[in-house]
Image: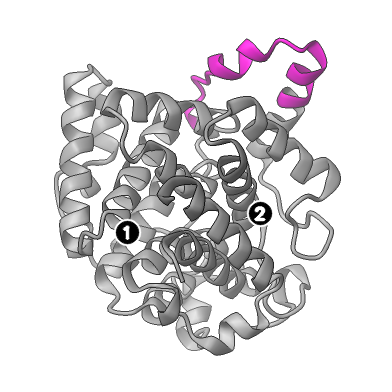
Amino acid sequence: MNLGQSLLLGIAVGDALGVPVEFTSRDFLRAHPVKDMLAYGTHNQPLGTWSDDSSLSFCLAESLSANAYDLKDIAKGIVSWFQDATWTPNGNVFDIGGQTRNAIDELVAIFKRKNFAELNQRHNNNEFSNGNGALMRILPLAFETFDLPILKKWQLIKEVGSLTHAHIRSNMACMIAVLFIEELLDGAKKNIAYLVAKNQCLSFFESNDFPSTEIDKFCRILAFNIQSFEEEEIKSDGYVLHTLEAALWCVMKGESYEETVLMAVNLGEDTDTTAAVAGGMAGLIYGASSIPKKWLDVLVKVNKIKDLGKRLFDQYYE
């Protein structure tokens, strides 16, 4: 399977592993660790069901595979997911963050006004609006940003992320994740990919006068090696910085796709998102063939996801 399929299947399988135990504490999962795909649980969903993390990643991938980069079409996909259940596993939206829900209302209003320039101008100064709802869906954008100058990469990442989460901290987290994915797409080993991505981001942030208070928030990723921290120092709630740290921590410490995503799920709390982000990264590192067949066999709409991955790959590599 190709890089598009490896990324998207990696996201969806990690997500589906985490859905049944979302919001479960780390202490409980230490005593009762997730070792395999489960059914029902937190959201009462069938085996192999993925959440909004995958749905919105697929909506982005769908837009990119059809149009390359079109911000209006990407925004339309987000709205269609919520209103029409586009790219949902079982025809219903069962998990959505508060910030994402509010942002969709704002996007609907923009479409009604037909003032689409507003899509490029979204901004948010409220640091308490930094949930992980942009980070969880941003990874496919790396196919588009791969060959662009770094300032253009930032522009596109900021635009797409800001459709739902427009604070600079969320934008910066998305930038780090996308540049890491770019290096993996280029065939770099994970240690090199991490080193290159963090050095690129730190240099870009510092040379473009990003607030030092914001850069400092990412010091454990950019100034240190995230894998050097102990599990007790890694948080796995829905805060964008914690999700990025947790996903990278699992990716850098894990030695296979399976080990990486199970590690992510068993950190607890926002299990589906941590495992979706880590799973997308691990899917590229180890390849789709490394994902256990027993998990792919029960993944909802697996063939549709494979087809989307192929179309995403073909758009950029043919």
Check disc 2 and report its element: helix, strand or loop.
helix
Q: How many marks?
A: 2
Q: Main secondary structure of the magenta part?
A: helix
Check disc 1 and report its element: helix, strand or loop.
helix
Q: x, y percentage for residue 10?
A: 48, 67
Q: Does the magenta segment cover residue 72?
A: no
Q: In the image, what residue occupies the spot 49% across and 19% down?
A: 125
Q: x, y percentage for residue 204?
A: 21, 28
Bounds of the magenta segment: 107-127
Q: x, y percentage for residue 193?
A: 21, 55
- Disc 1 packing (10 Å; few <14; some 14–19; many ≥20): many
Please name the amino acid that badge 1 sits on: Leu
Residue in the foreground of this view, choosing between 286 and 229: 286
Query: Mark 2 — residue?
Result: 55
Instruction: Find residue 17 and report its image quarter.
Output: bottom right
Q: Is residue 278 above or below residue 242?
A: below
Q: In the image, what residue occupies the spot 46% across and 75% down?
A: 266
Q: Earlier in the sequence, mark 1 or mark 2?
A: 2
Q: In the image, what residue occupies the spot 70% across and 39% down?
A: 77
On the question of residue 3 being in view, the answer is yes
